[in-house]
Structures are given as structure tokens and as C-alpha cells.
Image: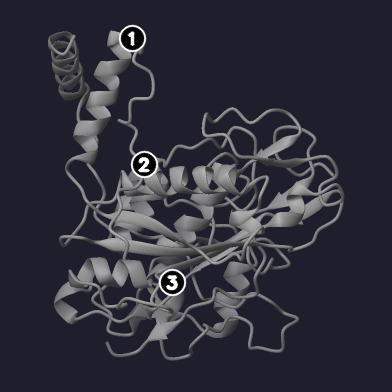
Amino acid sequence: TDTARHEKLPLINYHERARPLWNILVDSRVNAHAMKFSEQRNSSVSKRAIGTLLSLSALSAVHGASLVPNYLDGANEGFNDATLGAQRQAAFEYALGLWSNVLVDSYVGETVVVDAQFDGLGGTPTSATLGFASPQNSTFVSPANNPTFNPNVFFAGALGNHLEGSDQSGTGTGNNEIEATFNSDVDGAVVLGSTTFYYGTDDNAPSGTTDFVSTALHEIGHGLGWSGSLDVDSTNGNVDGSYLNSSFITSYDHFVQRTSDGSALEGLSEADRFSAATGDNISWSGALGIAANSGIAPDLFAPNPGQPGSSYSHLDEGDFPTELMSPQATPGTGHTLSPLTLAILEDQGWTIVAVPEPGSALLLSLAGLFLARRRR
């Protein structure tokens, strides 16, 4: 099946779920540092590399939001598998660290707990779902902290905590902010044929594998807020074009517009919303997302017929084939959290690490060289 946009590969979707699994809080951890780029693994690293590493370390020093895993698998399965478990955990925690490196904390100890597991999600020799994820403990926020100024908007649990400046989710069982599930069948001999997950963190997945880190990054993105609640499934018996909760919408929903006239989707009839969301006629309206796309509203994925779990809550596959938040996994996507990916989260209220100007990075690098020489 010719699906992966650049070369002949099996059809690989990140996830297929009829609707996001929003666990709504109407009213309303382990404090370990995720992996940082600045971790030095080899004493023989070059002076130039040391400078770069220290530059990235300086970037990470300005934030403290920490994403930490809570593995749900039992003994000898999934993330605890005797053969693959250690590799899976290392790759997943690396992905958590990449997200942690770009999120600025709003309160001391800001932590996002990610429940994670592997399950057999099935598939065929030519197509499979790699995984799915959803925000948990979603919540409304006080008017003073609501960037949408719409009282009917609720936020992913992690984002709600961030906006309110405290942990609204609580601690203990059931108080996670994200839930993610990955397809263990991909590592078998039937699903996707000989294609398996690649658990390396070097962004260099060999031919015949699909990169797990980029899959994990994608799913975590959904849990942080890249998740809408519009129904585009014409087979599930629900009203097409309706929202998950008829009275409320998510922060993501709030920024979706009909491309042809710029009308906010939330203000349209259900029929008009469905028509736009299955007619290649929706895009992002947030100012930061538009700015990150050279001043053009970035198109969202809106095929006809709708594809539950892929439609609406992703960037358009044709326009953004190698963007992390497009619906299909494509060689070349990599481990980069792009300006567009981050801007769409920032529109919803996340605070993102500012990348220094090249001159500032150079100064940090030079400082790194100086420090490296003194420590010899």
C-alpha cells in the first residue's frame, strides 16, 4: 500500500479512536527530572559538542515542567517485557524528556504524569495503528487564567494545571494527566509483516522499522492538548458534526475555523461543521500557529469520508507530511518538536521555551568551551 508519502511502506496510522477519551473534571509524583539533551555520555566528546550540549543545558535551565511515566503493564509484558521492556522504557522516557525540555513550568514541581502501556491493538501485514493517547482529568479554568475567554472551554488536565498554577489533578491512582497505549503487535511477525518498532534514540531508524520515539512524541502531543472533540464518524449513531459534550468544547476545538470564510467552527451548525471537517475545509485560527506557518492558517486533516481518530485533530497530511502532528508516521518525521507543533500548543495556553538568537547560542557555546577547558 502506497501510504507513507515518500516511499512504499505499509499504512501506519498513529491512532484510530472514534473520539478522544476526555476525562472531564467539571469543578474544579514522582519528581524526577526527565532526560535532558545536556547529559554527557562520553568523556571524549569534542569541544564543539561540549559547547552545544551546554547551550542546550542552559535552555533547559529556564523551565521545570517534568513529564514522568507511570507504567501500567504487568510483569513480563509491555514496558516490563523481559526482552524489550528496558529498550521501550528508555525510548519512552527519552521522548518525555524532549517534551519536558520545551515546556516552561508555571509553578514549582509542575509534573505531568503519563500512564503508559503496550497492548495488542492488532493490524494486518500492510496496515496498523501504532498507538493512541488522550488527555485525562480535563478541567475548566478560572476566567483570569483562560486564554480563550470562553467559559464553555475545558482544557487537557496537564494544561489546566499549568494555567491554574497548581496541580488540579491530585495525586495517587487515577490522577494522571495523559494516558497512552502502544501496539505490542507491531513487534510480532504478522502485523506490518517484518516491520517492527525501532527503540533507538538516535533518530536513525533502519529500513524495515518504524521509529518509536517519534510515535511516542506524537501521542504525548495529543495528551498535552492536540485533541479535539468533534464527531466526524458517520457510522457510530451519533450526530455528525456534534461535539463530545454538546455544552462544552476543548481548547483545541476553540481554535478550529472553516478555511473558506474564517468562521469559527464552534459557531456553525452541526451540519456545517461536519461539511467543513469532511471537506478539506478546516484550519487553525490561533495567531501563533498562523505566524509559525509563514502567516498562513495551517490546514488540518479533513478527508472525505472522515477518518475517526485521524480527522480533525492533526495537521493536514498532504501539506505537512513530515510534521510530527500529521496523522501518519512517515520516514523523515524525526524527533524535532517544530515551531508549528509548539505554536498550536502555545495558542492554547502552554508556555514554551524561547529559543535564543544565534548570537546568544554562540556565546553559550563559547562559555561551554571555556568551562570544559578549566575542568581538565
Name the quadrant of the C terminus: top left
Other residues around mark 1 within 10 Å, as few (<14) / some (14–19) / many (≥20): few
- The secondary element bearing badge 3 is classed as helix
Q: Is residue 265 above or below residue 242?
A: above
- The secondary element bearing badge 2 is classed as loop
Q: Residue at x 65, y 67 (%)?
A: 278
Q: CA distance from mark 3 to mark 2?
A: 32 Å
Q: Residue at x 29, y 24 (%)?
A: 53
Nearer the observer: mark 3 or 1; the answer is 1
Q: Earlier in the sequence, mark 1 or mark 2?
A: 2
Image coords of residue 14 (percent x, y): 63, 55
Other residues around mark 3 within 10 Å, as few (<14) / some (14–19) / many (≥20): many
Q: Residue at x 38, y 64 (%)?
A: 113
> Which residue corresponds to mark 2?
35
The amino acid marked with disc number 3 is Asp
Q: Earlier in the sequence, mark 3 or mark 1?
A: 1
The amino acid marked with disc number 1 is Ser
- The secondary element bearing badge 1 is classed as loop
Q: CA distance from mark 3 to mark 1?
A: 47 Å
Q: Is residue 28 above or below residue 302?
A: below
Res 143 visible? yes
Q: Is residue 17 left or right of residue 21?
A: right
> Which residue corresponds to mark 3?
253
Q: Residue at x 58, y 80 (%)?
A: 241
Res 320 visible? no
Q: CA distance from mark 1 to mark 2?
A: 21 Å
Q: Is residue 254 left or right of residue 81?
A: left
Other residues around mark 2 within 10 Å, as few (<14) / some (14–19) / many (≥20): many
Nearer the observer: mark 3 or 2; the answer is 2
Q: Quadrant of residue 271?
A: bottom right
Tag on residue 46? 1
Q: How many marks?
A: 3
